[in-house]
Image: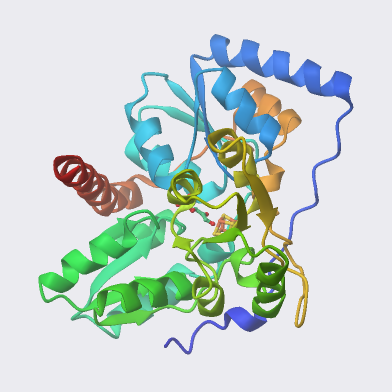
Amino acid sequence: MSALFDPENAIYPFPAKPARLSADEKTFYIEKIKGLLKERNAVMVAHYYTDPEIQALAEETGGCVADSLEMARFGSTHPASTLLVAGVRFMGETAKILSPEKTVLMPTLQAECSLDLGCPIDEFNAFCDAHPDRTVVVYANTSAAVKARADWVVTSSIAVELIDHLDSLGEKIIWAPDRHLGRYVTQKTGADVLCWQGACIVHDEFKTQALLRMKTLYPDAAVLVHPESPQAIVELADAVGSTSQLIQAARQLPHPQMIVATDRGIFYKMQQAVPDKILLEAPTAGEGATCRSCAHCPWMAMNGLKAIAEGLEQGGAQHEIAVDPALREAALLPLNRMLSFAAELKLKVKGNA
Ligand code: 13P
Ligand code: SF4
């Protein structure tokens, strides 16, 4: 366990909520964005946690709405010369590392992630230096500098499979930054994992006692949990997985209701996938609640229509992602390893189907 970082006492600079738009303003910005996307030969790459109107616009304009792995893959293979990444900064940086020839714009470069903020490169370097015998695996929710230090980058959709693979090769692992996902993959694989102690401020908030009470209120509901959630929440799950895996689970499980322990932004695509099922937010209130996030990431919420239009129109230092070339080169290797591993895994799953 790292003595360097204490997620319980971490304080993050929370962004101001974007101003609400009137219906007319929304229509204005949606039309403006559609025009700018065409003009700039740009495509939207949006995460499931952005607001429904952003996801709908990405879909309508031929972009993608996806988990962080698919966002990386989509951005790197799409022919557009500009990517408008609606998500948080590490997602924009990943897109730029994979496609340096493309212009990568974001609605705001202030869209952080507590996992990224909780893993500063100098402290992480010291942690890795103290354990030189370990393979360094970092979650995609990290800075370009942390990725550059890693042997592998991974997302939650392939984390168990990758750690299992490395364990089968006899490798000991450093995992960063999410402590809950780190514990989850360790339990699933039995691998020797030394874990950085970062946390997601959204998933860390789900409350066990309140969830137990909710389960008694909805005895026919399945519980779907993102593995960035605390262990006690994961233990109550009928399905644990990345955002896209949770949508898949909602489709496959027979239950008529789903209690969902992840950012509520996912409800837009999940409800499309299961129009007849009732989706319920897992509780963030209850004993010990601080409700710093209340099941919606404050940084994902910064991706408003007005900010997207400004990003596309203005570009420049406020909106364009730049990654230091040396860091980019070093971070590309573990990112490409992730994409190759994911592609091989997909082939294997297809072969077994
Ligand atoms: P996914 O890889 O499941 O999309 O998760 C990204 C994320 O930020 C979760 O909080
Ligand atoms: Fe980071 Fe959590 Fe927000 Fe995802 S939901 S971007 S892990 S703070």
In x, y percent, where is residue 161?
25, 61
Which quadrant is home to the N terminus? bottom left
Residue at x 62% of width, y 52% of height: 257
Q: Nearer the viewer, residue 255 or 88?
A: 255
| Relative side of 181 to 338, left or right | right
Nearest to the observer: residue 263 or residue 26? 263
Above or below, 172 relative to 291 = below
Q: How many marks?
A: 0
Give the vertical position of 115 relative to 100 (above or below).
below
**Residue nearest the viewer, comparing 246 with 101:** 246
Q: Is residue 115 visible?
A: yes
Q: Quadrant of residue 131?
A: bottom left
Q: Position of residue 194 (x, y in %)?
A: 33, 82
Q: Position of residue 330 (x, y in %)?
A: 27, 53
Location of residue 191 in the rendering, given as x and y in whole percent from the top left corner = 24, 78
The quadrant of the rendering that contains the C terminus is top left
Q: What residue is drawn where x is 27% and y is 69%? A: 136
Camera sees residue 317:
no
Vertical position of residue 104 compared to residue 287: above or below: above
Residue at 86% over, 31% down: 21
Examine the rendered structure and indicate whether residue 6 appears above or below residue 150.
below
Q: How is the image coloured?
A: rainbow
Residue 220 location, quadrant? bottom right
Left or right, 343 with reference to 272: left
Left or right position of 141 against 30:
left
The residue at 54%/48% (across/down) is: 89
Q: Nearer the viewer, residue 275 or 83?
A: 275
